[in-house]
């Protein structure tokens, strides 16, 4: 997968595993709400040199970005 700044990527929900979470590629960490199960997944986007990495973690309670 090619990840470019300003682009969109799909990431899996850490609860239901659906690819219903779309995030814009920009450095930072934010919670996102799954459109399928409505639970929150923490998404961290990190830039190291010219490469981007996307990490996800399960959140049990948080205010999520729609």
Image (cartoon, helix red, strand yellow):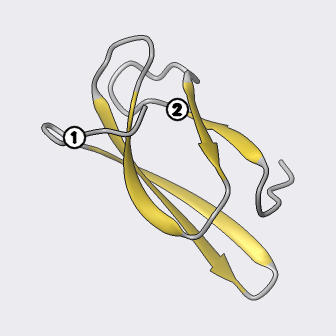
The image quarter containing residue 48 is bottom right
- Counting from the top left corner in percent of width and height, residue 22 is at 60, 34
- In the rendered image, the residue lying farthest to the right is 2
State how many labels appear: 2
The residue that label 1 is drawn on is 63
Frontmost residue, 44 versus 14: 44
In what element is the residue under mark 2? loop
| Alpha carbons under labels 2 and 1: distance apart | 18 Å
Q: Residue at x 38, y 34 (%)?
A: 14
Say what secondary structure mark 1 lies in: loop
Question: Residue 32 at x, y = what percent?
Answer: 40, 39
Q: Residue at x 58, y 72 (%)?
A: 46
Q: Is residue 25 above or below residue 17?
A: below
Question: Could you tell whether 40 is left or right of 44 in the image?
Answer: left
**Depth-wise, is mark 2 or mark 1 nearer the camera?**
1
Judging depth in this view, the residue of 33 and 53 nearest the camera is 33
Instruction: Give the residue number, with chain letter if any, for mark 2.
Output: 12
Residue sticking out furthest to the top = 36
Left or right: 6 with respect to 34?
A: right
Q: Residues within 10 Å of mark 1 (few under 14, many from 20)?
A: few
The relative height of residue 10 versus residue 30 in the rendered view (above or below) is above
Q: Tell whether 22 sits left or right of 37.
A: right
Q: State which quarter of the image contains the C terminus.
A: top left
Placement of 33 over or under 43, stated as above or below: above
29 or 13: nearer the eye? 29
């Amino acid at each position: 997968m090619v990840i470019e700044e300003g682009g969109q990527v799909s990431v899996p929900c850490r609860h239901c595993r659906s690819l219903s979470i779309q995030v814009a590629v920009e450095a930072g960490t934010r919670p996102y709400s799954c459109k399928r199960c409505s639970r929150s997944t923490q998404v961290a986007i990190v830039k190291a040199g010219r490469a981007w990495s996307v990490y996800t973690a399960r959140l049990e309670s948080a205010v999520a970005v729609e």
